[in-house]
Amino acid sequence: MKKILSLALALAMMLSLAACGGGSSGTKTDGSGDNSVSERTEVLTLRLGALGSGREDDIQSYPIRAFIDYVEEKTNGMIKIQYFPDGQLGQEGDMMDQVLTDDLDIGVLSANVLGTIWQEMYAYNLPFAFSTYEQLWDAIGVNSDFVRIMRGVVDETGLAKFVTSFSAEFRGVHNNVRPLRTPSDFKGITFRVMSGQIFTDMFQALGASTATIAFSELYTALEQGAVQGEDIGASMHLDYSFDEVCPYSTEFNMTPTVNCPIFSNGAWNKLSESEIQIINEAADIAEKASYEYVHNAADNQYARLVEAGRNVIRYADLTDADLAACWDAVKPLWDKYESIVGTDLYNIMLQCCPYYD
């Protein structure tokens, strides 16, 4: 744990991300000051639920652990966070319901699932908005205009408290039928998609059929042929051995996995102003740690797939014609979702998109 926090603190001092037009606002925090100290006299224990294996090297768990370590250290152990990974508390929809009813203090949940409550969250997954991790992190980082707007969206409903977003990695597209490069390759393949309408729309626009299946049932569904494909980051694809039943992988960089720490109102109202400052600092620290870790891990994960004998097409292997064909297929979704996510969020993503004209 200390190793993760030390790395996170170092990265917080070193990283300065390149802009793509998303813009940043607000005061940057680097967690280096001692102004944030919990004044409570009794330990506050908060429960946090998430997917991801929970291992220290897990790409989704890494920022969560950095977040927890920072909060516990900066509060001198007066705030403890119990971490329940790997869906121990249920699927993401279950954990979201628990947060909204104060039965779970913190849920680190994917943006598309949160989009079923706050449809503006679908802006995170507008297809082909980013081609690099640098663009992604600058646009949706903790101090970005994007996150500031999203906090306001959630605050306005009064249902919960939105802190920031952790991007795990770009989602890969995997199947057991054929290599994928263009929309014509998607035809005749049924993909398991996450809940949230934007993923259904995205894959159907590319010519595929879609089905919504619980993550816990996905391996069996692929093995038995109920679906032939899925879109999951390469790390989870490997961690859960989906490559055994989905040997074709393409790194389209079509959309990122974005996980957002959401606090229940009950938990948030227990925090003092100084503790909220610590939470915000922890989010900044975790985001920067995640950026560096994800950036390096993507290459490692795809290399592992190649070593395992899987058929892999990296983003750099796709031609301009391949990407242009995919973009032409999904471009109408941008027009559809502008009114859904709102002009401000839409324009931030639009400024980053390398294909839109």
Image: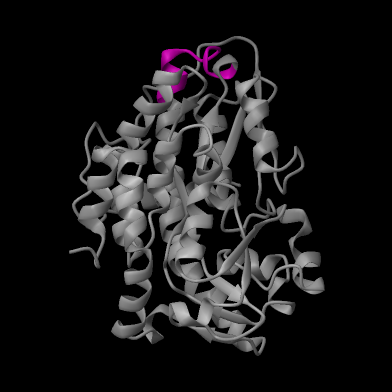
| In magenta segment, residue 271 | yes
Residue 356 coordinates in the image, percent (x, y)? 23, 63
Up the image or down, 157 lies above or below 340; here it is: above
Residue 164 in view? yes
Residue 7 shows in this picture: no
* 138 versus 27 height, above or below: below
User: For this rendering, which residue is in front, 45 or 148?
Assistant: 148
- 266 over 253 or under it: above or below: above
Query: Image point 45% across, 65% down: which residue?
Result: 205
Q: Residue 345 is drawn in which quadrant?
A: top left
Where residue 301 sits, quadrant-wise, is bottom right
- Residue 71: where, in percent of width, then height? 52, 31
Q: Which residues are magenta?
A: 267-277
* Residue 217 lies in quadrant: bottom right
Q: Residue at x 60, y 34 (%)?
A: 107
In screen coordinates, is 97 left or right of 155? right
Looking at the image, which is closer to me, 4 or 176? 176
Where residue 246 sits in the image (x, y, percent)? Answer: 68, 77
